[in-house]
Image (cartoon, rainbow, N blue to C red):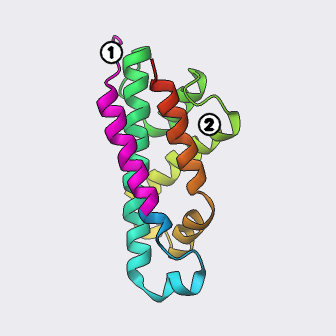
Amino acid sequence: MTGGVIDLKVVGDRLQIVAEALERLRSLPVEREPFAADWRNAAAADAELRRGIEALFDVARHLLSRRFGLGALEYRQAARACADKGLVPDPELAARFVEIAGFRNRLTHFYDEVTAEELLAVRAGHLDELEALAAALRAAASP
């Protein structure tokens, strides 16, 4: 696969999805009792996390394809390639991106094993990482 021109509209639109998902996630309760009191909180967290993570990986794969000619990468491969190619230059954040790829796979393929407790833990303590990844990919897309 050959590279091409980065479509800044695609990048911007997908990062807007990430921002909206993060905003909705932040509107959910952060404490266990209120979060668990309504089953819709876990359902919303699941949906918004999946949507935001998918949009992050859409951006990552777009940049990898257009800038480096890398295509058809599995999620963890795409996360590692983002680190290798400098799209996510912070090593700790890059390692988290690989872990997020694994969590995305669990949300999608092993959804029956993802607990409300896990969703709350991500809601309570990991949204800043998704935001940081979005910022890193936005910076990597800049001309």
Mark in front: 1 vs 2: 1
In the picture of the structure, the residue carrying the numbered disc 1 is: 5
Q: Residue type at mark 1?
A: Val
Say few, some or many: other residues with alpha carbon within 10 Å of mark 2 (under 14 / 14 to 19 / 20 or more): many
**Secondary structure that dominates the magenta span:** helix
Q: Residue at x 44, y 49 (%)?
A: 53
Nearest to the observer: residue 57 or residue 113? 57
Q: Can residue 68 be found in the magenta stretch?
A: no
- What range is drawn magenta here? 1-23
Q: Residue type at mark 2?
A: Ala
In the picture of the structure, the residue carrying the numbered disc 2 is: 94
Nearest to the observer: residue 64 or residue 124? 124
Say whether marks 1 and 2 touch (CB < 8 Å). Answer: no
Q: Is residue 73 at all visible to an observer of this figure?
A: no
Q: Residue at x 62, y 36 (%)?
A: 94
Q: Is residue 116 at all visible to an observer of this figure?
A: yes
Q: Residue at x 50, y 25 (%)?
A: 140
Q: Above or below — where is 93 with respect to 29?
A: above
Please, which residue is most extreme toward the right here? 92
Q: Above or below — where is 32 with respect to 87?
A: below
| Residue 114 - label | none
Of the numbered discs 1 and 2, the one sitting upstream in the chain is 1
Could you say where residue 40 lies in the image, as x and y percent from the top left?
38, 79
Q: Above or below — where is 87 with respect to 52?
A: above
- Residue 57: image quadrant is top left
Q: Can residue 14 be found in the magenta stretch?
A: yes
Could you say where residue 32 lies in the image, as x and y percent from the top left?
59, 81
- Residue 59: image quadrant is top left
* Secondary structure category for the residue under label 2: helix
